[in-house]
């Protein structure tokens, strides 16, 4: 005979009521929900609408925000699993909990952001649920005949349409690939009892990166390369970034030479980003650099060489010396914002 705990019984009722799209809500260590999660909920809710299901969300650990407000992006319910073991990120522990929520709520599609947590969790959840996984979706799936998801391949040079044929499906959504939708709704916040393992890893300390704005979450990124000649010249880059409320990035040789920290290095071997605006200053535009930034919505290039390859990928280009152009640009933006 198998005896069920009260928590299992209370969770069982979800199974009967729901056939849902479940969206994982990622938050910072300080409990702030990431912009990428607002995108993922908006995306999941749109898919739910498309296939006649409901969108629900799952949040793990301590949060400092009103979870009911996630309803404005289309989440009908938010399952909140609270446990001290979930307050530090351990992908194995968290994946097991998300799989439990998915199983007990009858979720047929689980959506993650394609950020570092989503990349660690989604494959683990997919294995647990025997689900097909598409990582890095860029658009809503085509559900007219099966379930076909579009994603970028070959560093954004082409796209692939991938069909998922399993009953349960997992998608990670590229950051900045889907516009956040805002409506009037309020989500029902439901405490969820799950079996939570003790983490096998222990965080003994952490160091915050220097950037004021998170690079992967940033709307605007100001990036500079070897054309800046040396680390002593980054003051004007930081001033431009501060004026725009932008995150800082750099090319790989700049990080390799320790002019800037490696967490700012973007490209094929660095971080891949997709901000609304990417400003590249004194960067040649090598293919390995472009691989990490070519999903940016708008690219502005400042380079003194009119033949620099980056101009081919640019929406706007300024041919000129960065040391003349950048201070003038910063002043002009400050003036526009009434800051000078
Ligand atoms: C396997 C592999 C992986 C790689 N991964 C990455 C990666 O992830 N990210 C990455 O960035 N690179 C990567 N690289 C390196 C890449 O190939 C390039 O060498 C690198 O991107 C060049 O950096 P840069 O544009 O800053 O420097 P440079 O190529 O030296 O270009 C400097 C640019 O600054 C311009 N310039 C000079 N002075 C001024 C001025 N005063 N005002 C305005 N413009 C000026 C020049 O015209 C030039 O275009 C990788 C390479 C390999 C082989």
Image (cartoon, grey):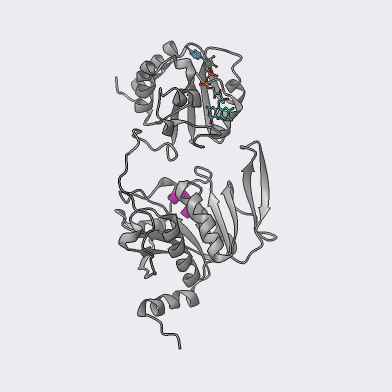
Between 45 and 309, the one nearer to me in the picture? 309
Span of residues in magenta:
37-41
Look at 37% across and 80% down and name the residue there: 5
Between 303 and 135, the one nearer to me in the picture? 135
- Residue 269's place in the image compared with 177, above or below, is above
Between 142 and 181, the one nearer to me in the picture? 142
Residue 214: % across, % down: 39, 38
Report the predominant secondary structure element of the magenta stretch: helix
- Residue 84's place in the image compared with 242, above or below, is below
Residue 83: image quadrant is: bottom left
Question: Is 334 situated left or right of 167 in this image?
Answer: left
Asked if residue 36 lies in the magenta stretch, the reply is no
Residue at the limit of the structure toward the bottom, as seen here:
1
Asked if residue 39 lies in the magenta stretch, the reply is yes
Say whether residue 334 is visible: yes
Question: Is 294 situated left or right of 42 in this image?
Answer: right
Question: Is 115 situated left or right of 200 in this image?
Answer: right
Residue 115: % across, % down: 48, 46
Residue at the limit of the structure toward the right, as seen here:
145
Look at 34% across and 53% down and name the residue there: 202
Residue 136: % across, % down: 57, 47
Say whether residue 184 is visible: no
Which quadrant: the N terminus? bottom left
Look at 70% across and 60% down and name the residue there: 145
């Amino acid at each position: 005979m198998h005896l069920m705990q009260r928590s299992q019984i209370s969770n069982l009722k979800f199974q009967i009521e729901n056939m849902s799209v479940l969206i994982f809500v990622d938050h910072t260590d300080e409990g702030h929900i990431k912009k990428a999660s607002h995108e993922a909920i908006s995306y999941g809710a749109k898919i739910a609408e498309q296939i006649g299901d409901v969108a629900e969300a799952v949040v793990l650990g301590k949060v400092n925000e009103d979870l009911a407000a996630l309803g404005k992006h289309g989440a009908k319910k938010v399952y909140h699993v609270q446990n001290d073991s979930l307050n530090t990120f351990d992908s194995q522990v968290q994946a097991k909990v998300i799989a439990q929520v998915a199983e007990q709520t009858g979720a047929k599609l689980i959506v993650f952001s394609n950020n570092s947590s989503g990349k660690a969790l989604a494959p683990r959840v997919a294995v647990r649920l025997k689900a097909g996984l598409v990582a890095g979706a860029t658009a809503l799936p085509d559900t007219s005949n099966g379930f076909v998801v579009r994603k970028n391949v070959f560093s954004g040079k082409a796209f692939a349409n991938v069909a998922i044929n399993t009953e349960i499906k997992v998608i990670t959504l590229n950051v900045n690939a889907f516009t956040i939708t805002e409506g009037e709704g309020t989500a029902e916040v439901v405490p969820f009892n799950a079996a939570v393992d003790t983490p096998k890893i222990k965080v003994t300390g952490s160091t915050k990166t220097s950037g004021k704005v998170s690079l992967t979450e940033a709307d605007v990124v100001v990036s500079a390369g070897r054309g800046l000649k040396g680390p002593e010249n980054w003051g004007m880059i930081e001033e431009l970034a501060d004026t725009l409320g932008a995150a800082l990035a750099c090319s790989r040789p700049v990080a390799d030479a320790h002019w800037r920290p490696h967490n700012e290095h973007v490209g094929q071997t660095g971080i891949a980003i997709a901000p609304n605006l990417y400003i590249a200053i004194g960067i040649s535009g090598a293919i390995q650099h472009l691989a990490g930034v070519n999903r940016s919505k708008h690219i502005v290039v400042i380079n003194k060489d009119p033949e620099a390859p980056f101009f081919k990928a640019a929406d706007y280009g300024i041919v000129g010396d960065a040391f003349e152009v950048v201070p003038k640009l910063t002043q002009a933006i400050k003036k526009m914002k009434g800051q000078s």
